[in-house]
Image (spheres, grey):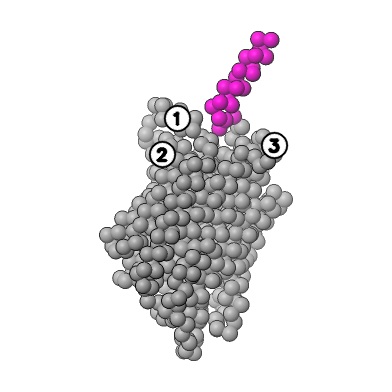
């Protein structure tokens, strides 16, 4: 029999898998599905800008008032609204739903991280294990299941739009401009880049809406509300509204969080580079747009498998060696991409880079999320709100310079942020090694009935 905490981790993971199968598929299609006037890319920029705004204020307010479970449910509904906006895409449908999604984005991820951290600490206390080990393991399980959404989302779009894909021979002059050899600002999208017929678009978006609604139902029905009592007590307390409203900013007084900003922002830079620059300047340029889905499926599969592997491995190696592996892998890929001249005859190489990038991203995601939960066990909501805010800022900056800078300079920027991360992160890790943060006490999130039962047992023993 699996433990109740592990069951809750599976429910959260499956819910996110279902939700991001829909959102991830739509996100990767925006630049081609809604290419008119740059509407698709603009909607993505609005999403991450709104996530930054919501990270500043919303997560502590929503989580402390609603609890983690219902914060996740409400935020998932915000994501589904974006799918509805894509049924009839236009500036008046996509931009408002992008804002709604962005406002729900930070509370969703903060609530998820908070829930997994609480579950990990509870299970660790129950099994007499180290809290950080269980938290690392739970985050590994989550990202193993969640990251596979990249596979299923791209598979759905490939199956539905596959009949519209036309393979066109790419001339040698185009191949000569692929990769970092040329500026890469005007890559011609070879293959069928026209919008598929409306019937197929509605079929795909309708499927995504169904998958998103399923995610909401899974979490609403099967997830335990483990912090219900704390949310109820908070609503009945007289704590000033401004105290909760500004919790995200107050945590910036902690030098450890400020020192982790480069690491957190790098997560946004490296994800945006693979999904935006690599797919356009290497895959689409040399192979055609019809290969993008297959490349991203390779990234998702690698990311998923490595997430579960490193989640287990962290208890034996610790975080630092894994972060070093991720940094060296990304460093090697960046240097190789600077000098590699992609050609259609090197088909296998196009999949090697996303596989290695998926390995690195698995470490960045699992270990950084777990690190935040371990360092700030009593300010989890504000800590994970900061995580989402700084990661989203990395996305926004990368989107901002995407159409203005040459590919070579973009690679140098990613490399520079990686070097800064390699300098700042060890400082926090060394301090944590010398002064370990105490995990939150076991009884902090006990179910109300368990507390009553424990009190009754004490009374009976005293009476006897």
Residue at 58% in and 55% down = 145
Mark found first going from the N terminus, 1 or 2: 2
Q: Residue 312, which numbered label?
A: none
Question: Which numbered disc flags the more N-terminal residue, 3 or 1?
Answer: 3
Among the two numbered marks 2 and 3 on one chain, the one whose residue lies closer to the N terminus: 2
User: In the rendered image, is residue 97 in sight?
Assistant: yes
Q: Which residue is mark 3?
A: 127
The correct choice, above or below, for 137 with respect to 464 in the image is: below
Query: Which residue reaches farthest left?
Result: 92
Write the start and end of the magenta stretch as one range: 443-464
| Secondary structure state at the residue bearing disc 1 | helix
Residue position for label 2: 61
Asked whether residue 422 is in view, the answer is no
Which residue shows up at 49% across the image and 33% down it? 228
Mark 3, Cα crowd under 10 Å, few <14 / some 14-19 / many 20+, is few
Residue 442 higher or lower than 196, as above or below: above
Name the foreground residue: 211 vs 150.
211
Which of the labelled discs sits on residue 232, or is there none? 1
How far apart are labels 3 and 1 at the CA level?
28 Å
Marks 2 and 3, how far apart in space?
Answer: 32 Å
Residue 140 x, y percent position in the rendering: 62, 52
């Amino acid at each position: 029999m699996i433990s109740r905490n592990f069951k809750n981790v599976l429910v959260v993971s499956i819910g996110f898998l279902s939700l991001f199968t829909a959102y991830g598929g739509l996100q990767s299609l925006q630049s081609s599905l809604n290419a008119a006037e740059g509407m698709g890319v603009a909607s993505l920029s609005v999403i991450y800008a709104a996530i930054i705004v919501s990270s500043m204020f919303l997560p502590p307010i929503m989580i402390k008032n609603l609890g983690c479970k219902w914060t996740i449910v409400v935020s998932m509904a915000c994501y589904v609204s974006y799918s509805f906006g894509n049924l009839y895409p236009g500036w008046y449908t996509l931009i408002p739903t992008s804002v709604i999604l962005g406002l729900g984005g930070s509370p969703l991820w903060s609530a998820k991280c908070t829930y997994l951290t609480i579950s990990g600490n509870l299970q660790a206390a129950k099994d007499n294990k180290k809290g950080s080990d269980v938290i690392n393991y739970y985050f590994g399980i989550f990202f193993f299941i969640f990251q596979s959404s990249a596979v299923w989302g791209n598979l759905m779009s490939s199956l539905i739009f596959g009949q519209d894909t036309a393979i066109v021979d790419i001339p040698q002059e185009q191949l000569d401009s692929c990769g970092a050899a040329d500026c890469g600002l005007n890559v011609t999208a070879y293959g069928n880049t026209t919008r598929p017929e409306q019937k197929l678009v509605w079929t795909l978006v309708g499927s995504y809406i169904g998958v998103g609604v399923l995610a909401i139902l899974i979490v609403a029905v099967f997830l335990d509300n483990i912090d219900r009592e704390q949310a109820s007590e908070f609503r009945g307390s007289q704590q000033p509204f401004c105290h909760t409203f500004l919790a995200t900013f107050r945590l910036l007084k902690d030098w450890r969080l400020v020192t982790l900003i480069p690491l957190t922002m790098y997560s946004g830079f490296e994800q945006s580079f693979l999904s935006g620059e690599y797919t356009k300047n290497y895959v689409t340029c040399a192979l055609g747009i019809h290969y993008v889905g297959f490349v991203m499926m390779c990234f998702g599969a690698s990311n998923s498998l490595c997430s579960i592997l490193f989640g287990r491995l962290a208890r034996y190696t610790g975080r630092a060696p894994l972060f070093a592996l991720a940094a060296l892998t990304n460093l090697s890929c960046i240097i190789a991409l600077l000098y590699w001249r992609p050609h259609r005859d090197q088909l296998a190489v196009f999949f090697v880079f996303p596989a290695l990038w998926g390995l690195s991203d698995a470490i960045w995601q699992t270990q950084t999320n777990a690190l935040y939960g371990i360092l700030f066990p009593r300010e989890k909501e504000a800590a994970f709100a900061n995580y989402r805010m700084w990661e989203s800022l990395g996305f926004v900056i990368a989107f901002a310079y995407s159409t203005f800078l040459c590919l070579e300079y973009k690679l140098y920027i990613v490399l520079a942020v990686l070097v800064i991360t390699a300098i700042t992160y060890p400082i926090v890790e060394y301090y944590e090694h010398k002064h370990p943060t105490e995990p939150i006490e076991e009884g902090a999130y006990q179910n109300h009935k368990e507390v009553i039962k424990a009190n009754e047992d004490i009374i009976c023993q005293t009476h006897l």
